[in-house]
Amino acid sequence: MKKVRIGLIGCGGRAGSHMKSFLEMEDVEVTAVADPIEERRLAAAEKFGCQNIYQNHTELLDHAADLVDALVICVEPTAHEDMELRAVELGIPFLVEKPMSVDLELAERVNRAVLEKNLLTAVGFQDRYQDLTDLIKEELPKHKAGGLVWGSWIGGIPGVWWWQKKTDCGGQLVEQNIHLLDELRYLFGEPLSVYATASRGIVKAGELCSEEYDTDDHSTAVLRFENNITATLVSGCYIKKDVGTRPRCGLYIMMEDILFDYRLRNNLIIETKNETRDIKRQENQTYTLDRAFVDALKTGDRSLIRSDYADAMKSLRLAFAANRSMETGEVIYFDKAEQ
């Protein structure tokens, strides 16, 4: 069996989930790794018996044509530089983690290049690949449209350095809660408008965070969709871990005759007049995402990929539109023809 050769750009935290997937796939071989931190790149190479080890993406891409069939890119939001553009030039398909960049202009350049080359791509919006999401998406059309959705991603401050400065991560909605923003698009289509607010002052720079902390402590985005759907999506990172508060992350979808209580990557409670079902997640959504990417590479069937770069751009643009609303106080309206 011919194996798909994967090159890893970035071997840190999120990359570990992809590596776990590839270790379980008999038809995948990781043939090259790159990471500026020696300990991380050596550990990744050891997992796969990989001999092609590089300090950065430039070195890997200089040799990529002979080494890999595809790339998996897992780097911090500010580190994307030219790696995707070079992959496009070389004609190498790639899976990239979200957010694809905090430089929206750069992401737009990558998107145009991908479309011009008709390159196979995928973006790591993992919630789309869950069995729980499949259940919601299958059940929703059976019920009368219209209702409210409440979504949240509330917790503390992640320890990674870029997360604490808004210019480095785009804020919590762009860096983290973009997962649920994308889930809303996947379930309800493109939004008509977004209005958002944000607040600072709860978290003090230097107290349980870096001196450079300047991101929003919490934000609220109100999104209007067609079919009388209005979603409120809140993001918060001010919860202290020692107060015993259990962060709530997920979506609560309230239609006229059915309720979906989606608890992020854990379980889904469906309530109707006659029954209540509590359904546990059965699949590892990252494995399903990676499997879809590999199978698309092998077969050419792009329908297996639920979010390619062009589709993911719509979620990234939406997140930045919400940021713009936070800054200006304006409602941002969307032209359906441009979406």
Image (spheres, rainbow, N blue to C red):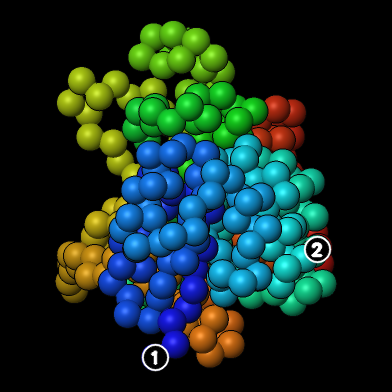
Q: In which quadrant will I find the N terminus? A: bottom left
The residue beneath circle 1 is 1
Give residue 123's position: percent from left, percent from top. 55, 62
**Residue at 65% in and 58% down:** 61
**Residue at 18% in and 26% down:** 244
Question: Is residue 148 positioned above or below 174 on the image?
Answer: below
The residue beneath circle 2 is 112
Rounded to the nearest whole Å, what is the CA distance between mark 1 and mark 2? Answer: 35 Å
Label 1: which secondary element:
loop
Give residue 111's position: percent from left, percent from top. 74, 61
**Residue at 35% in and 62% down:** 49
Classed neighbour count for the residue bearing mark 1: other residues with Cα under 10 Å, few (<14), some (14–19), many (≥20): few
Which residue type carries mark 1?
Met
Query: Which picture quadrant has residue 48?
Result: bottom left
Res. 278 visible in picture = yes
**Residue at 28% in and 36% down:** 247
Give residue 303's position: percent from left, percent from top. 56, 83
Between residue 219 and residue 320, name the one nearer to us.
Answer: 320
**Left or right for 239, reference 97:** left
Q: Are marks 1 and 2 in contact (CB under 8 Å)?
A: no
Q: Which badge, 1 or 2, comes first in the chain's sequence?
A: 1
